[in-house]
Amino acid sequence: MIQDAQKESLVVVKGPEQGRWRIGKKFTREAVEILRSDLSDDDLAALEADPELIVSFR
Protein backbone atom coordinates (compact mmCIF):
# COMPACT_ATOMS: atom_id res chain seq x y z
CA MET A 1 0.00 0.00 0.00
CA ILE A 2 1.20 3.49 -0.73
CA GLN A 3 2.45 5.13 2.47
CA ASP A 4 0.88 8.52 1.66
CA ALA A 5 -2.43 6.82 0.91
CA GLN A 6 -3.28 6.81 4.60
CA LYS A 7 -3.21 10.61 4.56
CA GLU A 8 -5.14 11.04 1.30
CA SER A 9 -8.30 9.55 -0.11
CA LEU A 10 -7.95 6.61 -2.46
CA VAL A 11 -9.86 5.75 -5.58
CA VAL A 12 -10.21 1.98 -5.94
CA VAL A 13 -10.97 0.67 -9.43
CA LYS A 14 -11.85 -2.83 -10.63
CA GLY A 15 -12.55 -3.87 -14.21
CA PRO A 16 -13.85 -6.88 -16.09
CA GLU A 17 -11.97 -10.16 -16.16
CA GLN A 18 -10.54 -9.53 -19.65
CA GLY A 19 -9.44 -6.03 -18.59
CA ARG A 20 -10.44 -2.53 -19.58
CA TRP A 21 -8.19 0.34 -20.63
CA ARG A 22 -9.12 3.77 -19.34
CA ILE A 23 -7.02 6.88 -18.55
CA GLY A 24 -3.90 5.10 -19.81
CA LYS A 25 -4.19 2.22 -17.33
CA LYS A 26 -5.52 -1.31 -17.62
CA PHE A 27 -8.03 -2.35 -14.98
CA THR A 28 -8.83 -6.01 -14.27
CA ARG A 29 -10.61 -7.89 -11.47
CA GLU A 30 -7.70 -7.06 -9.19
CA ALA A 31 -8.35 -3.79 -7.35
CA VAL A 32 -6.09 -0.87 -8.30
CA GLU A 33 -5.64 1.87 -5.71
CA ILE A 34 -4.90 5.36 -7.00
CA LEU A 35 -4.37 8.45 -4.89
CA ARG A 36 -7.14 10.93 -5.64
CA SER A 37 -4.53 13.67 -5.98
CA ASP A 38 -2.93 11.70 -8.87
CA LEU A 39 -6.13 11.94 -10.94
CA SER A 40 -7.44 14.96 -12.78
CA ASP A 41 -11.14 15.74 -12.54
CA ASP A 42 -11.47 14.50 -16.15
CA ASP A 43 -9.72 11.22 -15.28
CA LEU A 44 -12.05 10.62 -12.35
CA ALA A 45 -15.10 11.48 -14.44
CA ALA A 46 -13.98 9.02 -17.17
CA LEU A 47 -13.55 6.23 -14.61
CA GLU A 48 -16.92 6.87 -12.98
CA ALA A 49 -18.74 7.11 -16.32
CA ASP A 50 -17.41 3.77 -17.60
CA PRO A 51 -20.09 1.09 -17.03
CA GLU A 52 -17.45 -1.68 -17.18
CA LEU A 53 -15.54 -0.32 -14.16
CA ILE A 54 -16.37 -0.48 -10.47
CA VAL A 55 -15.13 2.65 -8.74
CA SER A 56 -15.13 3.12 -4.98
CA PHE A 57 -13.45 5.49 -2.55
CA ARG A 58 -11.54 5.01 0.70
Image: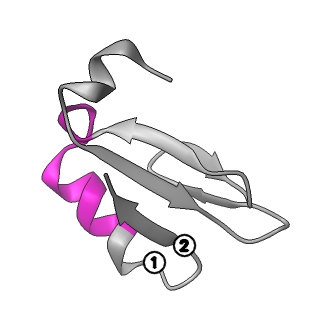
The answer to whether residue 37 is above or below residue 50 is: above
Point out the residue furthest to the bottom here.
51
Residue located farthest toward the front when viewing the structure as drawn? 6
Quarter where residue 8 is shown: top left
The secondary structure type at the circle numbered 2 is loop
Q: Which residue is mark 2?
A: 53
From the viewer's perspective, is 28 left or right of 33?
right
Callout 1: SS: loop
Residue shown at the point (28%, 17%) measured from the top left: 4
Asked if the residue at tag 2 contacts the one at tag 1, i.e. Cβ–Cβ closer than 8 Å, the answer is yes
The amino acid marked with disc number 1 is: Asp
Q: Residue furthest right?
A: 18
Using the image as rendered, state which of residue 35 and residue 5 is in the foreground.
5
The amino acid at mark 2 is Leu
As drawn, 27 above or below 33: below
Residue 9 falls left or right of residue 10: left
| Residue 24 is one of the magenta-drawn residues | no
In this view, which residue lies farthest toward the top?
3
Distance of label 1 from label 2 (alpha carbons): 6 Å
Point out the stretch of residues depicted in magenta.
36-47
Q: Please tell me how crowded label 1 is: few (under 14), some (14-19), or many (20+) other residues with Cα within 10 Å.
A: few
Image location (x, y in percent) of residue 24: 51, 43
Instruction: Please give the residue where the numbered disc 1 appears in the rendered image.
Output: 50
Is 6 in front, or is 14?
6
- The residue under the point 18% across, 33% down is 37
